[in-house]
Amino acid sequence: MKTTVPYVDKVTNTEAAAGGADAETLDSLLVRAPRTLRHGNRAVTVEDYEDLAMLASPEVARARCIPLRDLRADPLALDTQKVRGEVSVIIVPRSREAKPLPSLELLSRVQEYLEAHSVPTAHISVVGPLYVRVDVEADIALVSLEGASAVEQAVQQKLASFLHPLTGGLDGAGWDFGRQPHPSDVYALIEAVPGVDHLNSLVVHPHDDQPGVSATGRFLVFSGTHTINLVFEEV
């Protein structure tokens, strides 16, 4: 405590701090400044809603605007189910969790910010993302039996990192909405792990969190359960 309180000896934070973000980088500033000139703190276009959702809180890492759909009422609405006046904004929070989901407080904060900076006739719904879990099953031939457990651990870590929705992907910038990993990408990822000689087989299993998620094209992938079978093939 910075100041004393009668009969209070000390205080303890029972929950870990959450939220917040690092100071803005120069690259981020160079991207944000032209966008600020374009939208002028007023949401009119799809891009405006996405940019302002990012400005609503530093906790927002990704935003996507879906016009003419109320995703709060119907998260699985298809492109053919359009409703006039509706605007939905999907936000993804900054998180190291395998499946980042926004808190109710963050959803409310972004909702209030967008309503204050949009046209009065727009009915805005701020929601979290839909997810597709990706499981990988691989039969891996080792260079040597020595360090087999370390190889398995390294493969598991590589897959978890590669499939993270915000920091995964081929360039480490995360996954686009509606995109699933190609088996060829996973092949190259695993074969680059030290101690791996080659892959005998590889199967990538995508699983919708709920039926119909993949059909929307608005999902993000996340790392699921991976089955790694290791063998040593003597010549």
Image (cartoon, rainbow, N blue to C red):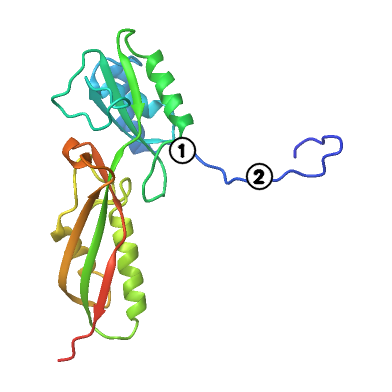
Residue drawn at x 31%, y 16% is 43
Relative to 184, does residue 27 appear above or below in the rendering?
A: above
Image location of residue 184, percent across then percent down? 13, 60
Left-right relation of 89 to 199? right
Res 45 quadrant in image = top left
Residue placed most toward the observer, 188 or 126: 126
Give the structural element (helix, strand or loop) at label 2.
loop
Left-right relation of 107 to 216? right
Image location of residue 61, percent across then percent down? 36, 37
Residue on which disc 1 sits:
23
Query: Which residue extends farthest top?
Result: 120
Res 67 quadrant in image = top left
The mark found on residue 114 in the picture is none
Which quarter of the rendering shows the N terminus?
Answer: top right
Query: Which residue extends farthest bottom?
Result: 235
Image location of residue 59, percent across then percent down? 44, 35
Query: Which residue extends farthest front?
Result: 211
Left-right relation of 235 to 192? left
Is residue 34 visible from the viewing direction of this image?
no
Residue drawn at x 30%, y 47% is 165
Left-right relation of 132 to 109? left
How many discs mark residues in the rendered view? 2
Residue on which disc 2 sits:
13
The answer to whether marks 2 and 1 mark residues whose Cβ atoms lie closer than 8 Å is no
Which quarter of the rendering shows the C terminus?
Answer: bottom left
Q: Give the alpha-carbon distance from disc 2 to disc 1, as whole Å.
A: 24 Å
Res 8 quadrant in image = top right
Q: Earlier in the sequence, mark 2 or mark 1?
A: 2
The three-letter amino acid code for the residue at tag 2 is Asn
